[in-house]
Amino acid sequence: MNNKARSFVTIMIIVGLSVVLLRTAIHKLIIYNIERNQSLALVNVKLFYTALENYAKDNKGVYPANINQLTKGNPVYLEKDYLAAPSVKGYEYECQRMDATGYSCSATPVNCNFTGKKAFTISTGGLIITEDCDGK
């Protein structure tokens, strides 16, 4: 085998190893981002719970009818309107129910298996339900 052929084989081996290392690094980075996004979404859902329960405590057991009562009232129970934002770190937030008797709010990944793998829902009284996202 001549030197040119040996150099070509060496370069191809280096390229192949580089591709494998880069793929592994990107995969680990995606997994890290998913875990970070999920942790933040769970923290934010717990913030909803705390804000809603504190509001009810201060208002004789009556929950707010909308997010504005939490973000624009006096005192402010929630510093950010997560429902108005298009997404926060790969998650979308919505409250399917928010009325004087209770609430149900959720955080769902924008892109299942890429921005998050779990959806979180919190209901009146602090019940948190964690489900795998459905890949929609």
Image (tube, grey):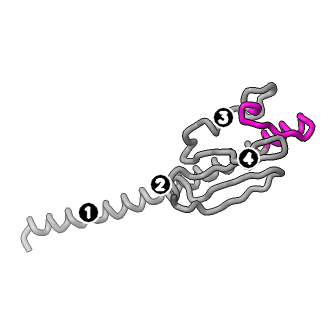
Task: Name the residue carrying label 2.
Answer: 29
The disc label shown at residue 66, or none: none
Task: Please name the amino acid that badge 1 sits on.
Answer: Ile
Q: Nearer the viewer, residue 17 or 24?
A: 24
Residue 105's spot in the image, x, y percent? 70, 48
Quick one: which residue is furthest to the right in this view?
60
Q: State left or right for residue 31 relative to residue 25.
A: right
Q: Which badge, 4 or 2, is on the more N-terminal residue?
A: 2
Residue found 80% across the figure and 52% down from its top: 126
How far apart are the two marked residues, 1 and 4, measured between alpha carbons? 57 Å
Q: Which residues are magenta?
A: 50-70
Task: Please name the amino acid that badge 2 sits on.
Answer: Leu
Q: Secondary structure at mark 3?
A: loop
Q: Secondary structure at mark 4?
A: strand
Q: Which of the two discs, 1 and 2, sits closer to the camera?
A: 2
Q: Is residue 116 above or below residue 94?
A: below
Task: Name the residue carrying label 4.
Answer: 97
Q: Which of the two discs, 1 and 4, sits closer to the camera?
A: 4
Task: Name the residue carrying label 1.
Answer: 14
Q: Which badge, 2 or 3, is on the more N-terminal residue?
A: 2
Magenta highlight on residue 65: yes
Task: Name the residue carrying label 3.
Answer: 81
Q: Secondary structure at mark 1?
A: helix
Task: Please name the amino acid that badge 4 sits on.
Answer: Arg
Callout 3 crowding tier (Cα within 10 Å): few <14, some 14–19, many ≥20: few
